[in-house]
Image (cartoon, rainbow, N blue to C red):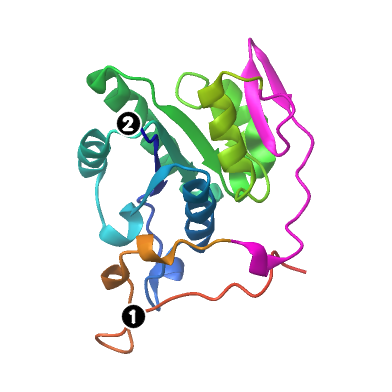
Amino acid sequence: MTKKLMLITPPYHAGVVEAAGSWPHIGFVYVAGHAREAGFEVKIYDTMTKNHNFTQICEQILEYKPDFVGTTAYTSSINDAIEVLSITKQAAMELNKEIITIIGGIHANFCYKELLLEWNNILDYVIRGEGEITTPELLRAILAGEPVDQIAGIAYLEGEQVRVNPERPFVKDLDSLIPAWDLVEWEDYSFYVMPGSRLGIVSSSRGCV
């Protein structure tokens, strides 16, 4: 049976982020493409744009029954991301199955230690840096019951100790990435000053100078 990965954007809201429009999480589009290429079924769930609350998020998790849930956060959205992971573990108990939780994004990249130590009951792995190659490698290793200590770009708790593996090199050729554009629910995304428009993103580089 094909294993399922659910990528959830936290339901964080801020005027500066949502002033001009709503747009897909392009990082999830790439991660989803590579995870699907590796044989996983993937769902991108943008709770921020859908304006879903935590009750609705729980309902969606229960309906999809994922084997893995990944979320992302910058510092201002970390509390909502943690709540998503907490809901995921609650849903896992209700479904009577294990759901592995993963978080990436800029906050987790730098604050992985405090996240793993403080939220060890709900957070299983942190993806550090670019996640397109790391995520499917991690998922395959978990399913195979293989050690994850050689997987670049992750941090995790081993007993009471935080283990951080070597960083994964940056993707040098962005054209080699596999975007899963068909998993985007395009009707959710619009440039507000143009009623009826559809809004997408082009990624021409990585990071800030």
Residue marked by disc 2: 87
Query: From the viewer's perspective, is residue 188 above or below residue 36?
Result: below
Numbered disc 2: secondary structure? helix
Which of the labelled discs sits on residue 198, or is there none?
A: 1
Whether residue 119 appears in this view of the structure is no
Q: Is residue 196 left or right of residue 83?
A: left
Question: Dot 2, how many residues are within 10 Å of its Cα: few (below 14), some (14-19), or many (20+)?
Answer: some
The x and y percentages for residue 33 are 50, 55
Query: Which residue lies at the image location 42% right of the left edge and 37% below the top edge?
Result: 69
Viewer-nearest residue: 142 or 98: 142
Check the image and name the residue furthest to the bottom: 194
Magenta-colored span: 148-177
Q: Earlier in the sequence, mark 2 or mark 1?
A: 2
Was residue 155 drawn as part of the magenta stretch in this picture?
Answer: yes
Was residue 143 drawn as part of the magenta stretch in this picture?
Answer: no
Query: Which residue lies at the image location 29% right of the left edge and 18% below the top edge?
Result: 93
Q: Quadrant of residue 56?
A: top left
